Image (spheres, coloured by chain):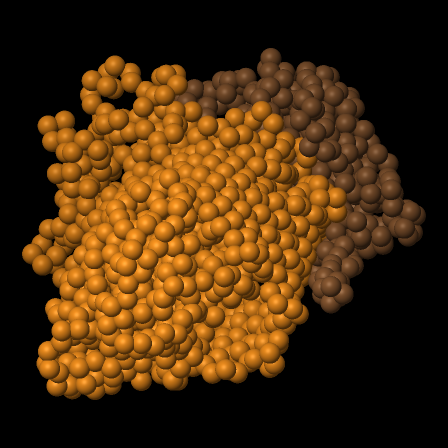
Amino acid sequence: MKKNWKSIKELLKVFYYSKPFLIMRITVFLLLFSVIQVMGENSYSQNTRLSLNLKDVSIENVLDEIESQSEFYFLFNQKLVNVDRKVDINTKNKRISDILDDIFAGEDVNCLVIDRQILLSPEYMTEAVNVTRDRQPQEIVVTGKVTDEDGNSIPGVNIVIKGTITGTITGADGNYSIEVDDPNATLVFSFVGMRSQEVVVGSQTTINIEMAVDEIGIGEVVAVGYGTQRKRDVTGAMASYSADNIQERGVIRVDQALVGQMAGVQVKQTSGVLGSGFSIQVRGAGSISAGNEPLYVIDGFPLATTSPNASGSFNVGNPLDNINPSDIESIQVLKDAASASIYGSRAANGVVIITTKQGKKGEPKISLNISSGFSEASRKLELLNTDQFIDRATEMINAMWVASGSGRTSGQTTEERRQILGLGEGLVNTDYMLDDRWAQPGYGGLHAIDWQDEMFRKGLVQNYQISASGANEKVKYYFSGNYSKQEGMIINMDYTNYSARANVEVKASNNLTLGIKLAPSFSIGNDPGIEGKNSLLHHIVSLSPIQEDLPENVNVFDYHAYKWLIATSQLNSPITKSKYTIGQTKRIRTLASIFADYQIAEGLVFKITANLDNTDNNIKSYIPYTVMGTLTRRQLQPGVSTSGSFNTYRKQSFVNENTLSYNKVIDDIHNLSVVTGASYNSNKLETASLNSLNGFGNPVINTLNAASAITGNTFETKDVLISFFGRAQYSFNDKYLITSSIRRDGSSRFGTNTRYGWFPSASVGWRVTNENFMSNVKLINDLKLRISWGKSGNYNIGDYSSIPLLGTSNCTFNNALAYGQVPISITNPNLSWETSKTVDFGFDISLLKNRISASFDYYNKLNQELLLNVPIPRVTGFPSSLSNIGKVRNKGWEVEIVSHNMTSDFQWTTSLNLSHNANKVVSLAGGQKQILIPSKFDISHSILEVGQPMYSINVVRQIGILSKEDIANNVALYGNQKEGDPKYFDYNKDGMIDANDRVIVGHPNPDYIWGVKNSFKYKGFDLEILVQGQSGGSIYSLFGRSLNRTGMVFSDNTLATYNDRWRSAENPGAGEVGKAYSTFGRIKNTDWLWSSDYLRVRNITLGYDLNTLLKSINARMYITAENFFGYDKYKGGYNPEAANTDLSGNSLYPEAGDYGGLPLPRSLILGLNINF
Amino acid sequence: MKKIYTYIVIILFIGSSCNEKLDLKPISSATTVTFYATTNDFIQSINGVYNSLQSGIKSSSPFADAGYPDRQLGLSEIRSDNLYAVADGPRVYEPINNFHKTISSNAYVEEAWNSNFNGIFRANILLDQLEKNGDVIAPDNLKTRIEAEAKFLRAFFYFDLVKWFGKLPIITYPVSVDEAVNIPRSPVGDVYQLIIDDLKFAADNLPQPESYAVGDKGRATKYAAKGMLALVYMTRSGPTYDIEGPGLGLNEWNLAMPLLDEIIANPNYAFGTSYNDIFSWSNENNSEVIFDVQYAAGYDPVVGATYPSLLAPVDFLRSAGKTKVYRIKRVSNDLLARYETGDTRKDFCIHQTGFVFNNVQEIGSFVKKYVDITNIPNNNADWPINFIVLRYTDILLLKAECILHGAPGSQANDVDAVINQVRQRAGLSGTKTNITLSELLDERRKEFLGEGSRWHDLVRFGMVESVMTSWIASEDVLNQIRPFQKDYILYPLPQAELDVKVGLYEQNKGY
């Protein structure tokens, strides 16, 4: 035992310290300190002598005995100091210090004796406190008050002048007073379970401090769905994200902030379009067609589950749309079924619980955040430049010319070819004739264009946020307002968001609390249609880098298309097109919750809530004919190609939940917490769309009143979910923890016989460190083993899927419309949810005086009764029927480690998360072994095969380039392949290459995802670096189909790898790309297969506390760089996570992939954060 | 404690009448449970079956349109010696033209199977509902008419299928999945029996053309059924080629004769005086038409046609300011050479003069029978023009064919005279005598170019093997087409169908 005998003259009143706001029903867990009130003289501890004779009694009894014999009073935390240990003690007239020395010999216990007050705690917690009574004469007297986040005063906080042994402790009212001799002195405030703070005194004489709970601290409370729980008592698998640093980083979307932060939570930025939702997967994907996005719960309000559509975008909104990240207090992700299944049929993909900010007791707090910077494309694609393009085009045109007839040689001039073809003067055949200007200096007046440079720009990003919060006995409030505007990396792409939030809670009487949470928002997003097949980005990379006109004039207005461009495509300048195209999304979203909390009796609370989430969204599109189609058409039929549309949706979720909760502590060791409730949940979607028909009469007007004619329709759909649920948590002596929950859900989406389902779960935890046998293990401060099992569901199929619906199927007789109705699906009246059963084993550990804390989880999740579209014979009328069949297993493990590497002046904390997930199709319908996922583009390239990961990539493998010998040896060929064409692997050895030679070459989901965050603090500076990545997955990029296919025509640009193509047997290039001109066509092969591995320095933020410099201001300045550095293996596109195009063309097997997705934006933002 | 119970009661209250709350009916769709309750419901139901003719089930390939006309152009015209549709890259029609073996996942092939079986399902579910709820239909004979229309269309779909695929699963009611996976392909003869039974019922119960209201013009008539039935008998009478294809080698030419004669004698039908006018947009439903697939433009959802531009190249349409992604499918030199000088059908059906688009010259010839370059709809998937399936000239030539096969009739009056009549209308002078089957086939080729009959004619005439083999030898200078085999008379079953339950269907020979 290390002695640290100190006393001070301050009189102490230490009160039971608690945080009512956070602890709610589990306050008793937080009985950390006793209440004492002692008064006396300085030297009491030195002078008092005690005699004790006790045998085989617990330390606790010894301390009791000392207290009864003397005026000493002990403060300690039973969780941290083991007082159950039995000791023998026999002393006569010994000083208290010697007695304690004996009792705690060999233990990691520090005894701080402050007059009559004795604080017992693990050594590391009091290290910083070097208080002495041998003080030097002081000059400046600094006073102040230390409070917690709720504004409650904290007694007993250690305040030390840094680098000295001088210090003091706050009194019962949280006030302190300390004399400092140097204005440059730094005060260090520290308290058990709170984050230490340092403040330079400067000219201040009053320094008030608000202390925050330490993340690894013992008091942290997390939301677990229908209640909260102390983090250290959690028995399920849960990831937490404290949203503290959202503000410090200046993110615009909540999901953006979550990237790389939590083990087992994969956040994919699938689109570069501003304001669009990210895709989140918790512990891999377990559903083939019913969606893999988690359920989002904001302040207890479960939002409607949505999945990206077949094209990868959230076309009726993402649950996190328009939500201001700065309003968020914390985020918890419930990962295993045990913790998530309280949300029953919606929890199979995990549950994300978001808690917004709440007013805290104390002076009203006003906070202002301003940030501004720029955003730009993080990368360009390497394409052929103008010279390389001309080189390839010349080679191909000559080859086509030579192949087109006998006597034709590549040496023949353009004029000679014209003669041979018999073309009139001025007429050309672009397949056979070169543009002579290509070879001339300066391209004979043609323009060399880098389309990417023309299109990408630096966009201005700004964000303004103000918030006010506070609380008193009766009212808690938090108000905020936010304005943010981002300009995109592309012309005419931007996003503006206005949002506000009011969280108000009123204590109407002793028993009754009423509250309201209101968050209206309005956003405007502009996107000229940049991502996806045949959209602008696709055009930018495909367009020939040599043109007759300037970039903005290519084939628009009165300019025609360059002849050597139009062979396959009729492309209009994407630059001009994006300028003149309107693609505007306006969204008004209001999240509203009201609740009433009534305490019926001690520990028994009834709560009723009503929530409404209303989104009104409209999308206006307009493309004028002046930037569309051909010059001929623009001239002959002006206005006809102009198109416009106006699409709206209104989405409403209404949820009423009523819960009864009960908390009880019996004999200090039995801790029981029960909640039960019922909920009604309905989601309604109303859509309307108006489209112009046959162009616009007046092309100057961009609203539909100018359209020649209009078509339109409206559509409505609704579902209802009714649920009952209950959960019981019991802990014994803080050592043994048991949680069990059950939910019964009934959904309108399922068949009458199968509407209701049960979703049970159970989990247990064992805090090993609380066992006696662990009391000598100094290395481990805390160790908790957890094991859980649970069942949850996924109900994400369309409404009415079990009802045989009819669809419109019109025909015509004698040129008049004849309405028709036909059944549109084969239905299954016994349709029910997918179920997901998860077993989870994990442990949480704290080591080396809590310097290192870690969590580990292993899970095995089996999704079964999948909502699978089983292929059926077409003689039924349909290709497939939706059934509950098939199984998918996800197995994996997760590690999270937080290490406080350095805690002195220079603070350095490392947080690491790493997770592994392996996904496997266990069974399909009947004895079926595989389902080939249809492809909208050429033959199928992905497969569901039993024993393989979902959506495995199944294509022909390229194994080199065909040589003359290969041809002579009759190797397997695809079609009329020739020397210099790619050589493919003849898997089935039938002597020819075809679809039957496809083999599985990869899978889309990564095997490992990881994130490492390093935070540094020194004096006023703080620095945070987040690096994240993934490995083991593959991307099959159909973007490659537009950029990198065999048999491409010369007029489309291609990847720079074509420079290393096969040109002749003597000049075979890199052995990967065949000769430029080929006629065998294409078969899906490994050409478009890329590893999706990446490593990205997602964020670097450097902050400086202006307070250090200017004493009068409580402000922080920061600069943050997002996505500035990175490395990935995807060279066939911009973003390995991109999803923007429906690849399967079949809603039964949704497969969204990349066919032209924007690069991630990289931004540099300067921010200022002021608190009043 | 009482209080607690009160709150528990409040919580549970929410759950009362749960089932009622969960019993949601679709807001924006009808369901089969509530449909089939009125006469109009049944009319809409039969209209839905006609829809299968005109739009079919689109495959995921953007280059393949669906519906009976598109299918005939894709699988019959392109496969035949009429078009030399070699491609500059992988196009959906290329393996059809080039006799690739690996076409079991080809979009055209899949469409033929899928659309027809979906149509059969639609007809079956209607027939099933007619039996259950048909009594609501008033007047009574309307119920009979709807039943006859449904059976006509079911036979129509099956006949189309049997020509492409041979043996087929026979489905006569809406089958469940469990049933479907146990219904194998039946012999062609059995399939024909269903077709003949259905067509006979239709011929007996469908109305005379004149008894349809004006707004019903285009529905199947008694004579449409008779004409189809005649063609069925004739197709069955074609050679077997030793494959289980549409020809059974039956000698039923004489069974077709009375049916054809009945149509020829009916005053509703007549030999069109002008070839071009038969296909005129402004002359639809003319007296040549026995049965057609009807289209109209400007409706939403679209009920217009896509087939007119299927054989015309994109730039041709672009030169009129339209876009469409089809590439040129050249008319074969062999066919171009077959037209005698002065044959107006050549210029009407084939664009031979090339065109310049954006200073680029196209010199190939292509079929533009339905395309009037000055009159192209704004929406290229919404052409208003009907596709004639069976027309009066065809009936006359079919009769001639029966006679040449030995059915009773006169060579001079029913064969030579008919051919000469057709030739005269095409602007050709001179009369021909002692017309042979081979000459008849040649005349049919020129008369019906772009109407989708060439492949079926070659097969029925027993000449597909010899004609295709020699044509490939002379036409295929680019050496793209694989040698013809008899197995190629049929298409392979879609691979997806074979994959559903291994062993349920066997693949056709040669694939």
Residue pictured at 44% horizontal, 51% vertical: A238
Q: In the displayed orientation, state which residue is furthest to the left.
A: A441
Picture quadrant where residue B441 is located: top right
Observer able to see residue A771: yes
Describe residue A99's horizontal placement relative to residue A612 as left or right. left
Q: In the displayed orientation, state which residue is furthest to the top.
A: B242
From the viewer's side, name the closer residue of A954 and A673. Answer: A673
Residue pictured at 23% horizontal, 27% vertical: A960
Residue pictured at 60% horizontal, 37% vertical: A865
From the viewer's side, name the closer residue of A1048 and A309. Answer: A309
Describe residue A499's horizontal placement relative to residue A458 as left or right. right
Q: How many marks?
A: 0
From the viewer's side, name the closer residue of A1171 and A70. Answer: A70
Which hue belongs to chain B?
Answer: brown
Picture quadrant where residue A116 is located: bottom left
Residue A39, given in percent of the width and then of the height, sits at 34, 77
Residue pictured at 31% horizontal, 64% vertical: A118
With respect to residue A1133, does A299 lie above or below? below
Picture quadrant where residue B119 is located: top right
Describe residue A881's horizontal placement relative to residue A202 as left or right. right
Residue B262, given in percent of the width and then of the height, sits at 81, 35
From the viewer's side, name the closer residue of B462 and A319. Answer: A319
Residue A828, given in percent of the width and then of the height, sits at 69, 41
Residue A325, given in percent of the width and then of the height, sits at 39, 68
Please identify the quadrant where the C terminus of chain A is shown. Answer: bottom left
With respect to residue A176, does A383 lie above or below? above
Observer able to see residue A795: no
With respect to residue A106, does A123 lie above or below? below
Which hue belongs to chain A?
Answer: orange
